[in-house]
Amino acid sequence: MHLELVVPALLATQPMPRLPALELLRARGRATRDAPRALERWLAHAFGVTEEPLAAGALTLLADGGEPADGYWMRADPVHLKVGPDRLALVPVAACGIERPEADALTATLNGHFGGDYTLLALHPERWCLRAARDLALEAPSPAELASDAAGGILPRGAGARRAHALMNEIQMLLHEHPVNLQREQRGAPAINSVWLWGAGRLPQGVRGPWQSVVSDDPVALGLARLAGVRPAASPQTASQWLERPPQDGRHLCVLDAVHAARAIDDDDSVLRSLDALEQRWFVPLLAALRQGRIGMLSVNIPDAGESWETTRADLRRFWRRPRPLAARP
């Protein structure tokens, strides 16, 4: 059995703490290098998707049990735009906190205003999708990639960029003095004063995956798995939970994005806690499982670093390959 992990932002922390189990897996394994990619682009490449941009909106709806059909969907994630003296920063909603009643009230107001031209669904308080009555071709990265970027570098591009900018401006005006935001400001919480449009398109065609199962909390990964006919499931809290009922054979994918999420909200303490949790809950038990022969091969992929390595039980015998700090690149 071959287990593959995808762990975005794993090596992005400076200074990097020591993670002995992961360092050993890396030292004894076989490394490969590739072009750095955002998680969504890595997933698109892995599932053989050639359409660009990746239709994250339609895939998210599919993962959440909806039916995108042939509709034109995009993600319209709630965000807080923070105005500074010389820049405009986008703060992902994960750093702001939003409750289900707030999300429902905000999307109800927007749907009432736009009628049938645009329809917003709050699939999750922090994860919204928008259906456009006609194509709104645009290219934009996800909010997690945009945290703290300057506004001049984050505006959507593409043939529909002008319409997208106008739509976002109209949404901002509707949200500016919304009762939900007035209440949030009274209690000192950041206003949900905009949405970020990204992942526009229709469901991709010809999706295929090399795995028998995919476990993840990322809806794009789960949507691609469903589309490819690969068994999807929510990610367990620990590798030990996954190993309690492991598939008998084949190749399996697990997407672990806790570090990526912590970096997106610019919380150094959360990043360090996430790294420690990965070491104790995943890399330590997986190293033990590899030694015991419960898994045959373990691969670790860090898409944003363009780095991967794979380790077998036999590789662990290469004692002369001594672990080094993760900050030291091979």
Image: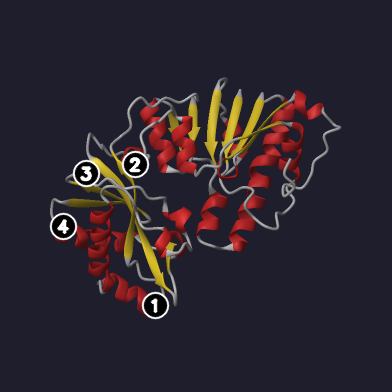
Residue occupying the point 37% across, 39% down? 54
Mark 3 and mark 1: span between their CA atoms?
Answer: 39 Å
Mark 1 residue type = Arg
**Which of the marked residues, 3 or 2, is nearer the chain's N terminus?**
2
Q: Nearer the viewer, residue 158 or 315?
A: 158
Q: Nearer the viewer, residue 135 or 238?
A: 135
The mark lying in front, picked from 4 and 3, is: 3
Residue occupying the point 51% across, 53% down? 261
Q: Nearer the viewer, residue 186 or 194?
A: 194
Disc 3 target residue: 135
Residue lying farthest to the left in this orientation:
115
Q: Is residue 223 above or below residue 268?
A: above
Disc 1 target residue: 187
Mark 3 residue type = Asp
Mark 4 residue type = Phe
Mark 2 residue type = Asp
Residue occupying the point 21% across, 47% down? 132
Disc 4 target residue: 114
Cβ–Cβ below 8 Å for labels 4 and 2? no
Residue 85 in percent (x, y) is at 44, 77
**Which of the marked residues, 1 or 4, is nearer the chain's N terminus?**
4
Disc 2 target residue: 64
* Apparent side of residue 98 relative to residue 173 in the rendered image (left or right): right
Mark 4 and mark 3: span between their CA atoms?
Answer: 16 Å
The mark lying in front, picked from 4 and 2, is: 4
